[in-house]
Amino acid sequence: MDFTITKGFLQQERAEVAALYWEAFAQKLHYVLGPRQKALHFIAAQLQPDFALVARGAEGTILGAAGFKTSKGALIGGELPDIARTYGWLSTCWRAPLLMMVERDLADGVLLMDGICVSAQARGMGLGTALLGAIKHEAAAQGLSAVRLDVIDSNPRARALYEREGFEPIGQENLGLLQHIFGFKSSTKMLCPIVPVL
């Protein structure tokens, strides 16, 4: 399958990218951001094109996307008023603290991968590997020294891919009782050193 990877997406592609993201992360986020229609509305509104790498097929169809986070922003932002616009203030009171519990901190010189998703018809064709490579290239272009990501214990295939691509585990976080909300018991922090482009 032929595809190209470029930075950003068009305004009219927001819903498509949001649907792709939700398909990849609904199992983890359905209690906190669901139901589906509200989640899609919220995600589409908060997506930041400058923090996305998007893979497109020959006809321009979006096949996958990888988000990243730096000190300048992230693929999906959103403050309390943004959450409240979709879910209402009462609902925001319990959703926001839960979202904060899975928020990941930045470190100096490190690009944080903020989700990678590949459409069902494009899986198994090397797109995930290509998006990871594009993320590394983006980190190098920004003069950063490493890429970090978190992988959940219920996704061994993703972890195997990351290990093949040079990521090594540097720590683990257990969710405890929150596993019943997010659907996984623990996540492993993984780091891949990058040679910055000066």
Image (cartoon, rainbow, N blue to C red):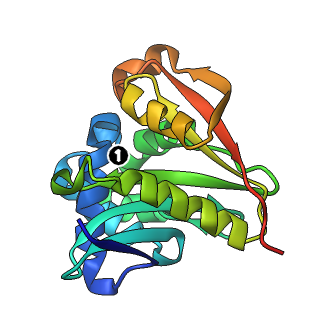
Residue 174, compared with residue 34, is above or below; it is above
User: Can you tell which quarter of the image residue 19 is in?
Assistant: bottom left
Q: Amino acid at mark 1?
A: Ser
Measuring 65% from the left and 32% from the top, which residue is drawn there?
168
Residue 194: image location, x then y, percent: 73, 55
Residue 192: image location, x then y, percent: 68, 44
Residue 141, compared with residue 144, is above or below; it is below
Is 88 left or right of 7, judged from the image as shown? left
Pick the residue in front: 125 or 12.
Answer: 125
**Residue at image mark 1:** 91
For the question of whether residue 89 can be seen, the reply is no
Measuring 41% from the left and 20% from the top, which residue is drawn there?
179
Please identify the residue farthest to the top as the structure is shown. Answer: 176
* Quadrant in which the C terminus appears: bottom right
Pick the residue in front: 38 or 165.
Answer: 165
Is 70 left or right of 42, judged from the image as shown? right
Q: How many marks?
A: 1
Tell me the element at label 1.
helix
Residue 191, compared with residue 9, is above or below; it is above
Residue 63: image location, x then y, percent: 26, 65
For the question of whether residue 59 can be seen, the reply is yes
Residue 111: image location, x then y, percent: 67, 57
Please identify the residue farthest to the front as the structure is shown. Answer: 1
User: Can you tell which quarter of the image residue 171 is in?
Assistant: top right
Is 23 left or right of 78, judged from the image as shown? left
Crowd band around label 1 with a 10 angstrom C-alpha radius: few (<14), some (14–19), many (20+): few
Measuring 38% from the left and 63% from the top, which residue is drawn there?
65
Measuring 23% from the left and 69% from the top, which residue is drawn there?
16
* Quadrant in which the N terminus appears: bottom left
Residue 153, compared with residue 110, is above or below; it is above
Pick the residue in front: 39 or 139.
Answer: 139
